[in-house]
Amino acid sequence: MTNRQILQAMSGLMAGMFVAILAGTVVANALPTIIADLEASQSSYTWVVTAELLAMTATVPLWGKLSDLFDKKLLLQLSLGMFVVGSLLAGFSHDVELLILSRVVQGIGAGGLTALAQVVMAAIIPPRRLGKYAGIFGAVFAIGTVAGPLVGGVLVDTSWLGWRWCFFIGVPFALLAIALLQRTLRLPAVARREVKIDFLGAFLIVAGVCALLIWVTLAGNEFDWASWQTAALTGAGVLLLVAAVFVEARTAEPVIPLGIFRNRTVTLTTVASLLVGVAMFGGTVFLSQYFQVSLGKSPTVAGLMSLPMILGLLVSSTVAGQVISKTGVWKRYLVAGAVIMTVGLGLLSTIDADTSFTLLSAYMAVLGIGVGMLMQNLVLAAQNDVPASELGAATSVLSFFRSMGGTIGTSVLGAILANRVASEMTKGLDAAGIPAGGDGGGENSVPDISTLPEPVRQIVEHAYGVATADLFLIATPCALLALLTVVFIKEKPLKTTSGMERLAEEAATAKETDKTAVGS
């Protein structure tokens, strides 16, 4: 394909990715209003947030495997269609149960978009040329991440629109993506062997992953880490995944081919993706809360304050991708990205309530530069080193583990944040001689800074500043482990043929081998 044909095909992919990112970010500032309007509980608040993430994380490997067996274009359009259905259900919800169900449908669709967009890119673009296009997806990621919370806040605050438009707004983009994919994406049909779908393995993987993700999401909030609920969920999750491994090792068409982990590059990039998810998402997801509570900024300003990190990610991913496409050398950028990400997290571990925005912006930019050089190029390294027939499985495995790392990091660090805030606030109130209960919040609620008296406000700001810095300090070793993992990845020349071309070559080779075997 020419550059023009690739860009035309990517237009639909970019619209689809924008939809997936927007779905996860647009409700961030709207949820308090949504929960109050539906007269729901705090636990329902948690489930509205986690339902989509659980569904997306658990189904990514399934979409990846399906892309190795069925038409990728049709699967992309199906995932977008599911997103439209989920969005409409969410927008018309009149009770929280339907809203949670609709978020599950949205999550399944978003899981397909997350996995399939990268699979299709690898199918139509040779690894040697893939880097130069990664910056475009970086731009889409940046716009969706920054615009989502801002758009959500504006919609909620506009009386003639309201929170329901937080869900409706993604529908036109999804329909546009379906139309663009139909018009621009041309994937040649490749002969496949008889398809056998591993339904049992798929069920065991989804059930096992959901059990563990529900545990890390609710532990420390709904129940203690050391409790019978923890024992039940972790025990069930481990048993289900052990059974899944047993089934996957013996089925003809496994959802996750265990053989791909014999590939050193796939194994190491998978481990690195998990660690990046823990360090990156687990640390940065609480920055918005730090901006609003510790620095006293509005939701809109808090969204704008994350721009330095997003811009750093965008610039580094674009520049690194262009250089990799030009030179064919990629490992040095993985190592440099891991080093810079570790430094960025370390710098952010020094922040407090008095840190200037200039210094904070520099620290966030450093983190964004590191993540931009590392995250997308891990996928490139894995895609370059697997047979074309396993592109979908390898890509989805990396996306799955990165998403799971983010879920684990967010849940565990969230529990640590709550405990640290409660401890610091208790200590500060005692030192100031202020009776407990006058802080306007506590372990399970975020105080409204604007309503607090000055002495209490300073204590709350300090508590959230110290606690947020601790999260980055805890995330730093994860980034360091990711660096050690990346160092052991062996650099191999980037292939100059696309996934579809390699698949055709592999099919032709297999056919010749069969003829030779019959002839002998």
Image (cartoon, rainbow, N blue to C red):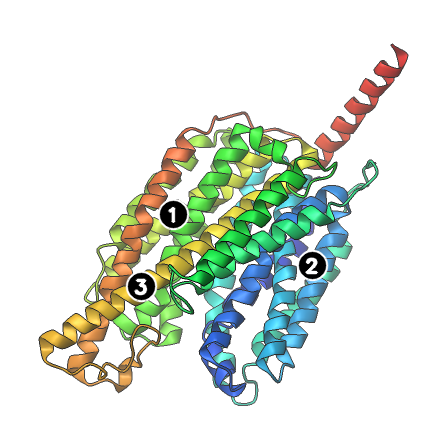
Give the quarter of the image for residue 410: bottom left
Residue 194 visible within the image: yes
508 or 239: nearer the viewer: 239
Q: Amino acid at mark 3?
A: Leu
Which mark is first along the chain, 1 or 3?
Answer: 1
Q: Nearer the viewer, mark 3 or mark 1?
A: 3
| x, y percent for residue 254 | 69, 40
Q: Quadrant of residue 466?
A: bottom left
Q: Residues within 10 Å of mark 1 (few under 14, many from 20)?
A: many
302 or 195: which is nearer to us?
195
Determine the residue located farthest toward the right in the rendered image.
Answer: 519
Instruction: State the image coordinates of residue 429 (x, y, percent, origin top left).
Output: 15, 76
Q: Are marks 3 and 2 in contact (CB under 8 Å)?
A: no
Give the residue type that dot 1 points to: Ile
485 sits left or right of 169 in the view: left
Residue position for label 1: 369
Image height check: is 448 above or below 86? below
The structure residue drawn at horizontal position 39% and vertical position 40%, both measured from the top left corner, is 482
The tag earlier along the polypeptide, 3 or 2, is 2
Q: Which mark is residue 79?
A: 2
State the residue position of label 3: 417
Residue at 56% over, 76% down:
166
User: In the rendered view of the protein, which quadrant contains the C terminus?
Assistant: top right
Mark 3 and mark 2: Cα distance apart in space: 35 Å
